[in-house]
Image (cartoon, helix red, strand yellow):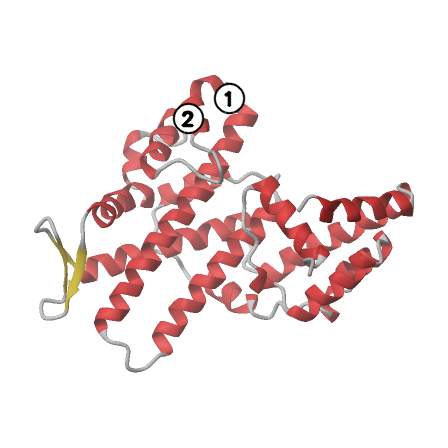
Amino acid sequence: MSKPVVEYCFERIEREKQIKIPRALFNSKGLTELERAIETRNPFAISRVYKEYKKYFDLSKLNELSSALKKERNRISEEDKKLISKLITEKRDPYYFFEFVGNLWYLSRLIEEMKQTKGLSKNIKVSLLFWIYLNITELLTKYISDLIKEKITLEHDKKRFQEFIKKFKDGQHPEIGSLIQTIHKLNLLTKDELEKTTLVKSKFIRNIMSHANMYYDDTLDKIILSNGNIYNLSKFEEDCARMYEFLQEIVYIFNGRDTNLIGHIEKIFAEISKKFKRVGRTIPLREFSNIILKLRSED
């Protein structure tokens, strides 16, 4: 059985942009209606779904994220905010917005379930916290690397940054050490400013976690590493909370320094609706139909 056309569309975007759009942001009713519209091979039908998205898509789950963005993020530094502001320009690719918000939603849901689930042992909670920390670090490394690559492409001589660019291959991204070096090479922050960022602070604990076996000792309430080092749990929890705030700050600035995430999506959907309407006015229906059929042939 062939996949829905809408899934082909998602996958094509993901291949071209090297991103992953979380399907959880779109409920089944909305995806079904969009699939029906695409199957008509009529751009005006697709335009209508995006224009009247409130009939089909339930985006209420984003209200929780919007509320979280309204809270003060006092763990991150001014240097963090300065770095993010320099990397995120006004010309933001809307597809990245869905990836940012989708991953933030997955993480927030896991954190909330941890808080609400009774009977979880401290060992299990800390193990989940390890996973959350490493996942946030990977997400941030990927996001910021993508933003820096875009900045290099638009504003700099790519030959100077060949080693950094080469690391983008088969969906991979530069490691955090290479990322930090490139930030310094681009003069986005001074050396002293860079030392105060979450990325540099994260590099230390992430390297510890990546290169040593570790476990949580509930009798000491500490993290024990195979190399004999001991890490205070309270310090690690603070580091994890700061990383999460850093990710929230990226979404906040990416959203135009606005906490209203649904408002941003409304603008994106309105623009998509207009684009399909323009397509309907400029491209013959048979040609548009062939484009839809070609999506399936690329599988």
Query: In the drawing, what numbered circle is on residue 103?
Result: none
Task: Name the residue at the front extreme.
Answer: 1
Residue picked out by circle 1: 156
Question: Quick check: can you spot residue 242?
Answer: yes
The type of residue carrying mark 1 is: His
In the rendered image, residue 30, in percent from the top left (x then y), is placed at 70, 67
**Left or right of residue 91: residue 276:** right
Crowd rating for badge 2 (residues with CA inside 10 Å; few <14, some 14–19, many 20+): some
Which quarter of the figure has residue 263? bottom right
* Residue at 68% from the left image edge and 67% from the top image edge: 57
Write down the quadrant of residue 144 in the picture: top left
Residue visible at 44% across and 27% down in the picture: 166
In depth, the one of 68 and 126 nearer the eye is 126
Picture layout, residue 96 above or below residue 105 = above
Identify the residue at horizontal 74%, vertical 61% (top origin): 35
Mark 2 vs mark 1: which is more N-terminal? Answer: 1
Q: Can you see residue 75?
A: no
Q: Name the amino acid, label 2.
A: Leu
**Image height check: is 195 above or below 96?**
above
Relative to the observer, which residue lies in front, 218 or 195?
218
Left or right: 111, with 33 as reference point: left
Q: Nearer the viewer, residue 151 or 217?
A: 217
* Element assignment for label 2: loop
Per the image, the residue denoted by label 2 is: 186
Q: Are marks 2 and 1 in contact (CB under 8 Å)?
A: yes
Q: Is residue 266 above or below residue 19?
A: below
Number of marks: 2
